[in-house]
């Protein structure tokens, strides 16, 4: 793994980066007094609520609560991780990102190979517009597949002309370049002439495959007719492992304004045609089934993954493989859903027939993972009696047990199975069912090929360490809301004959996971997102006087909104002159819990309960410090009573 980026470089990069230029290059801004405003790129809105303060180099949206500096904006807007955002800003600033001592990653080790692949992509794109036989390719794309020149440019489509050495002559002019093209899968060595090569891709439409940062790492080639193979992909190379990559992921991140879900389809053309019809958040696997690494990778970007399959037998089989791949990497607050298309249709053909709106309705009506799991378990049963029901239960539990034990989702599935099977959920939860051979293989593959393994701390973890708990809290708050269910009204497709075939699918909404914020920080976040509640809250003087760092921040936020009841968090940030307070507020606003706190029904109660908790703790500390000898006189006893009463009373 490459070494960590030094702190000093991060500071220097931010000092040399103008946030206004960064944001203005991505969205339209309008000067409003000392600040700039515009439509927020992170949620849909018609009137501007996005504000940028050029003096403080900070942005904040009054609508969705997004806020931060240049790094956080690029991360959020461009859908990049921390290190990639640093590299984008450094490139724009003409700076080279230094690294502390550490082993170079595979991309640094293969920088020249990546250059040859980029040159190959440029070569193929050039042939699409300049080669004498270009009409063959352009007619296929425009007339046969209905693609526009604009969408072809977005995905970098190209043309590999007929012939054995077109790429070799253009890009492989030197022996070193030929060696790199060979390692990159672009050339094939002649068996009868070692050291002599020919082009892998010939007479095909070319689809460059990019990684999540937009670097070309491989190619796919589509034949014009029924030649075999219809699709030809690059072999695996030092920079390309097909089981870890997804076609179209980079383009989806770049072109999807609200990137909260991803559709996984089966082919290149499905991704491109959906994008042309305005559905830009689709990706495709690269000649492999959906695997656990794909799901884990997508969960880092979005909260919902929709697996879209053809409605035929092969599509159903692929869906089950996707189901099995999802189970061991499921997370609370994440969803995997399944969309089955009509027989004979794929996303490409269906979106052409129905259009964007109808296809989106199908996505909204997709089946939940729990429904598909229980349906699959039922469809494997051939008997309609007690023996069949017992087999159904074993089938379902063998899959449920692949879900991590600590997840609320697992408990909910067991409860659903209990409702359908009539077996107590505790009995089901304690039942050990041997894994099938296929499940054992999945577990072995998952553990043998993790996405990343390293003993070092990542840059993102180093610069944004997890928040610590409050000194009075041994654990973070775990007050869950009750899971709610609704009946979708869909008819079950369970096989007839079983006594449970009348059950309808129930959509499950999972309670939030425990917060990584301390109780005090959660209360501060509630005030920042709901400033109007400050007027209904009071913090007693003894608590203010004894406040530690976290509590001081809460008190300052409360004081400001109590004094200015009509102001919002943007006003607070604009008026703050303490850099530490500004950074603390920015960190809170950027925390994942901000989305949860924005929608809680009673933020006022959460803040009041936190203050009461701290009051009680302070009273206990006072008595503990005074000790038994301090209450040996009536005067001291009355003093303690007065102090405790003062802590509990609200100021008039």
Image (tube, grey):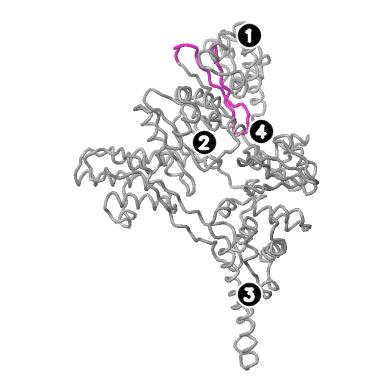
For the residues carrying marks 4 and 2, which lies nearer the camera in this image? 2
The percent position of residue 647, horizontal first and vertical second, equals 63, 77
Residue 103 or 250: which is nearer the viewer?
250
Res. 616 image quadrant: bottom right
Residue 1 makes an appearance in the image: no
Q: CA distance from mark 3 to mark 1?
A: 81 Å
Task: Please provide the residue range marked out in magenta.
Answer: 200-228
For the residues carrying marks 3 and 4, which lies nearer the camera in this image? 3
Dot placed on the residue nearer the N-terminal end, 3 or 1 = 1
Image disc number at residue 262: 2
Circle 4 residue: 108
Provide the secondary structure element on which disc 2 rests: strand
Dot placed on the residue nearer the N-terminal end, 2 or 1 = 1
Left or right? Give the position of 382 relative to 284.
Answer: left
Provide the secondary structure element on which disc 4 rests: helix
Q: CA distance from mark 3 to mark 4?
A: 62 Å
Name the residue located 39 percent from the left edge and 32 percent from the top edge. Answer: 340
Name the residue located 62 percent from the left edge and 77 percent from the top edge. Answer: 649
How many numbered callouts? 4
- In the rendered image, the residue lying farthest to the top is 132
Circle 3 residue: 650
Circle 1 residue: 131
Left or right? Give the position of 421 relative to 473.
Answer: left
């Amino acid at each position: 793994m490459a070494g960590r980026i030094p702190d000093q470089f991060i500071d220097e990069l931010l000092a040399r980066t103008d946030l206004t230029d960064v944001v203005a290059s991505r969205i339209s801004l309008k000067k409003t007094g000392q600040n700039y405003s515009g439509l927020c790129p992170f949620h849909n809105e018609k009137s501007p609520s996005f504000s940028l303060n050029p003096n403080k180099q900070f942005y904040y949206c009054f609508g969705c609560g997004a806020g931060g500096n240049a790094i956080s904006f690029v991360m959020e807007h461009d859908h990049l991780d921390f290190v990639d955002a640093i590299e984008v800003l450094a490139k724009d600033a003409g700076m080279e990102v230094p690294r502390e001592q550490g082993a170079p990653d595979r991309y640094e080790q293969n920088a020249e190979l990546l250059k040859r692949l980029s040159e190959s992509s440029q070569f193929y794109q050039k042939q699409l517009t300049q080669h004498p036989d270009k009409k063959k390719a352009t007619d296929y794309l425009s007339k046969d597949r209905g693609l526009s020149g604009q969408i072809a440019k977005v995905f970098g489509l190209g043309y590999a002309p007929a012939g054995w050495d077109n790429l070799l002559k253009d890009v492989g002019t030197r022996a070193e370049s030929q060696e790199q093209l060979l390692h990159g899968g672009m050339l094939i060595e002649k068996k009868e002439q070692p050291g002599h090569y020919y082009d892998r891709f010939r007479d095909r439409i070319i689809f460059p495959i990019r990684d999540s940062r937009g670097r070309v790492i491989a190619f796919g080639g589509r034949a014009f007719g029924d030649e075999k193979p219809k699709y030809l992909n690059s072999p695996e190379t030092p920079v390309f492992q097909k089981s870890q990559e997804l076609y179209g992921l980079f383009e989806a991140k770049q072109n999807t304004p609200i990137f909260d879900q991803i559709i996984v389809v089966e082919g290149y053309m499905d991704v491109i045609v959906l994008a042309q019809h305005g559905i830009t958040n689709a990706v495709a696997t690269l000649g492999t089934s959906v695997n656990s690494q794909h799901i884990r990778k997508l969960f880092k970007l979005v909260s919902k993954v929709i697996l879209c399959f053809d409605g035929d037998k092969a599509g159903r089989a692929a869906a089950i493989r996707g189901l099995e791949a999802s189970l061991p990497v499921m997370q609370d607050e994440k969803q995997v859903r399944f969309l089955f298309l009509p027989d004979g249709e794929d996303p490409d053909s269906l979106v052409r027939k129905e259009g964007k709106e109808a296809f989106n309705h199908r996505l909204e009506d997709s089946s939940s993972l729990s429904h598909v799991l229980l349906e699959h378990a039922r469809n494997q049963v051939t008997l309609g009696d007690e023996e069949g029901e017992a087999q159904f239960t074993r089938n379902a539990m063998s899959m449920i047990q692949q879900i991590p034990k600590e997840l609320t989702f697992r408990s909910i599935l067991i409860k659903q199975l209990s409702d359908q099977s009539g077996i107590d959920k505790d009995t089901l939860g304690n039942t050990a069912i041997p894994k099938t051979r296929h499940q054992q293989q999945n577990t072995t593959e998952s553990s043998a090929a993790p996405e990343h393994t390293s003993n070092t701390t990542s840059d993102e973890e180093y610069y944004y360490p997890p928040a610590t708990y409050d000194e009075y809290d041994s654990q973070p708050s775990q007050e869950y809301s009750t899971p709610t269910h609704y009946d979708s009204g869909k008819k079950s497709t369970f096989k007839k004959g079983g006594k449970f075939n009348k059950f309808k699918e129930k959509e499950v909404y999972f309670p939030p996971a425990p917060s990584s914020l301390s109780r005090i920080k959660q209360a501060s976040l509630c005030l920042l997102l709901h400033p109007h509640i400050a007027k209904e809250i009071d913090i007693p003087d003894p608590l203010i006087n004894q406040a530690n760092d976290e509590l001081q921040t809460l008190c300052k936020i409360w004081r400001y909104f109590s004094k200015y009841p009509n102001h919002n968090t943007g006003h607070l940030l604009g008026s703050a002159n303490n850099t530490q307070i500004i950074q603390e507020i920015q960190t809170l606003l950027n925390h994942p819990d901000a989305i949860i706190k924005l929608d809680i029904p009673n933020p006022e109660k959460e803040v009041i309960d936190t203050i009461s908790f701290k009051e009680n703790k302070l009273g206990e500390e006072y008595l503990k410090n005074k000790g038994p000898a301090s209450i040996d006189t009536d005067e001291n006893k009355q003093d303690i009573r007065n102090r405790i009463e003062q802590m509990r009373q609200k100021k008039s």
